Image (spheres, rainbow, N blue to C red):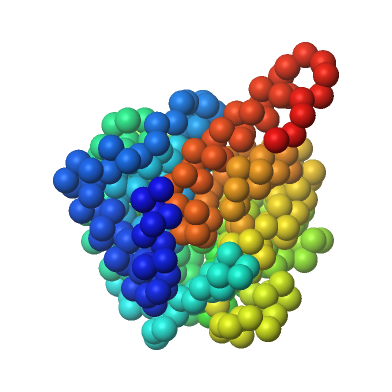
Amino acid sequence: MLYTLARPLLFSLDAEAAHELTLSALQRAYDLGIARWVAKRISPLPVRVMGLNFQHPVGLAAGLDKTGAHIDALGSFGFGFIEAGTVTPRPQPGNPKPRMFRLPRSHALINRLGFNNEGADHFIDRVRQQRAFRDRGGIVGLNIGKNADTPIEHALEDYRMCLRRVYDDADYVAVNISSPNTTELRSLQSVRQLAALLTGLSDERKSLQDRYGKRVPIAVKIAPDLADASVPEIADRLVEHGMDAVIATNTTTARDKVRGQKHADESGGLSGRPLTERATRIVYLLARHLQGALPIIGVGGIMSGADAVDRIRAGASLVQIYTGFIYSGPQLVADCVEAIRDEECAVSSPPGPTRPRA
């Protein structure tokens, strides 16, 4: 209710300014103890993925909390897990502003932020200050990328550097090779470059595992714009190199579903409702090929509880929301959990009369 009242004001502001204002207000509400009075309590729906125990399968996608400074505050809205970042080894300002745009008619966003962040050292300092969410059983993933000025042929060193920096503080690490807003980044999804990257990350993890005495899961985030035939090839490389999950998908560069709308021609990644169908298909293609060999985290265009259920049906073990959270507010978290719970109950129930649809 409170978010419904606040949304017209937020949507009257520049999209990135509204984003920053929302995080600031949320943090203030959390610090004052107000957030816990408005957050909806969500009953557990436990699931074990990547060797981790999640209280329920609905999480927050990377990008909303790029600095790792708001994990506890965002966690107060009932997420089962939160992915912070993307973080790069060195600080960088990202792309020039304006760089985030709303397409309200399609419940969509376009962003070309470009991994704006304060660098890995500052990021980890912030993450370490956030303990309340984890103390309540929340899972925290840390999403890593490369600096924009690092040549693509040296990208592995950036990822290795980030992995070393975040390893001891992450429940899992997400490797972002699919943002459309860093030049040539998506070329890392080609079979040859992906194999080299994963070999390097796997070797780095073995060293870190010996050093810290624990194996931190690694998930790789892929693009929705891959050709269907490329999806099985990528899946095979992930399995071959011992990755622990695949995150499907990032934002899209396609514009066919928003053509003619204001801001539709802005460059960057499109998220929200126009991405729903394609992101679901990528999950389906992965699941059909992997046959359970690797868990899938479904993200992209999850705007309702029904969308979350569709992603689970397609083969995802976990789901993440971002743009839906911006358009619908915190209620979406509870809606997704309850829809998945109802789906699981329906599947496990003995055959009987079909329940009427609401």
Residue drawn at (36%, 60%), measured in percent from left and top? 6
Q: Residue 22 sits in which quadrant?
A: bottom left
Vertical relation: 220 (above or below) 136? below
Q: Is residue 325 found left or right of 117 in the rendered image?
A: right
* Picture quarter with the C terminus: top right
Vertical relation: 176 (above or below) 316? below
Residue drawn at (50%, 54%), measured in percent from left and top? 328
Vertical relation: 317 (above or below) 98? above
Nearest the viewer among 189 and 318 is: 318
List x then y, in percent, for residue 173.
45, 49
Nearest the viewer among 244 and 80 is: 80
Residue drawn at (71%, 19%), measured in percent from left and top? 348
List x then y, in percent, for residue 51.
51, 31
The answer to whether any part of residue 60 appears in the image is yes
List x then y, in percent, for residue 356.
77, 29
List x then y, in percent, for residue 71.
32, 48
Residue drawn at (79%, 61%), measured in percent from left and top? 228
